[in-house]
Amino acid sequence: MKALILHGVGDLRYEEQATPEPRAGEVRVRIGYCGVCGSDIPRCFVKGTYHFPTIPGHEFAGTVEALGAGVKHFSVGDPVAVFPLLWCGTCAACQRKAYVQCSNYDYLGSRSDGAFAEYVIAPVRNLLPVPQGVSLREAAMAEPAAVARHAVARAGELQPGASVAIFGAGPIGLLVAQWARAAGGDVLLCDIVPEKLEQARALGFNKVFNSKTGNPVGWIEEQTAGEGASVCIEAAGVPVTLIQACKSVARAGCLVLMGNPSAEVTLPAALISQLMRREVSLRGTWNSCYDPEAPSDDWREALAAMADGRLQADRLVTHDVPLSRGIGALEMMRDQSAFFSKVMLRPDETA
Ligand SMILES: [Zn+2]
Ligand SMILES: [Zn+2]
């Protein structure tokens, strides 16, 4: 099969590799689409993966192509999305079914081979059926959509009309915005990239603010009659937006830390005091809840919301690129040489 293989930091090659065979309890998935995550850029160009060579790519959907021994409930040809974290099943977190907190996990696309390829191997317990009417390209966004749902859930139940300020309107921020809207929130979006704010407007969000042209804290104050936002979700990972988010939370509000921090942040004493006085809850959010045995989890809700239109994930796709041109697409993202939101890679058409 063809794959984008990372041989070392910055050494990504499009080349041939043996098509992997599923073992017992596993399936081979023929990749339909694999999204490029923001984290794939430092993974490929700065930090590398845990060992080399590795095939990156963890946001994907495809069709079941071959079954290992003992696989039930899925058949060849089924469209599936895949939870990319492989949990150990025995640690304390796994015993609590908190699989993303597993202390001994493996991960498709960073520790094990992922989906910048024609095929990937996945355990059957990691598969989710893609509902009718959801394309494989959209289903490939189940991972960021589940992550976004989890972040909104971490803020607790939203009161109807509660203001939700989101800092960062990248693909995750815009998915967070759609979940917050679906939960009845009044969404306020801030970013510094005009194209991202345009995308937000196209998705029906009209309370958007370009933080390059003014102070988002004052804008949020105006929009909330001086109260501040009930929920602030920091989805940019930039020191200045974290400070803005801290300043914008209402009394008894909640601030969700979501963006991967890109640098140290210094919180002024007066701001810490304000957070205390306002009795603000600070919550972290990490990945998503996945539980194949539960009636519902972030992943199944994400796919269901794509099917019923609460989420319009596919509209975030700005680039749909064949794998053979994937290296150029990743370099474009690294260099930010063009505007992009979600970049999707797909195997080249087989003859
Ligand atoms: Zn990701
Ligand atoms: Zn574990």
Image (cartoon, rainbow, N blue to C red):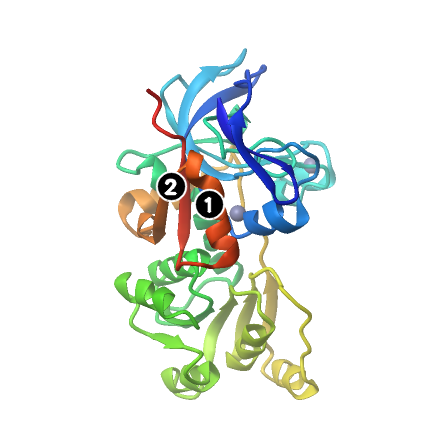
Res 150 visible: no
Name the spot of residue 283 as percent of width and height, x first.
Answer: 60, 64
Q: Is residue 228 left or right of residue 178?
A: right
Task: Determine whether label 2 and label 1 are within 8 Å by CB.
Answer: yes
- Residue at 41% across / 51% down in the picture? 342
Circle 2 — which element?
strand
Q: Is residue 110 left or right of residue 215?
A: right
- Residue at 40% across / 76% down in the picture? 210
Circle 1 — which element?
helix
Q: Quadrant of the C terminus?
A: top left
Q: Quadrant of ligand 2?
A: top right
Q: Is residue 163 left or right of residue 93?
A: left
Query: Which quarter of the picture shows residue 30?
Result: top left
232 above or below 181? below
Q: Closer to the camera, 95 or 31?
A: 31
Between disc 2 and disc 1, the foreground one is 1
Name the spot of residue 252 as percent of width and height, x first.
Answer: 54, 77
Q: Which mark is residue 328?
A: 1
- Residue at 38% across / 41% down in the picture? 321
Local crowd size for mark 1, using a 10 Å CA cut-off: few (<14), some (14–19), many (≥20): few
Q: Closer to the camera, 79 or 51?
A: 51
Query: Which quarter of the picture shows residue 266?
Result: bottom right
Name the spot of residue 276 as percent of width and height, x first.
Answer: 65, 81
191 above or below 19? below
Q: Which mark is residue 321?
A: 2
Name the spot of residue 245 as percent of width and height, x first.
Answer: 53, 75
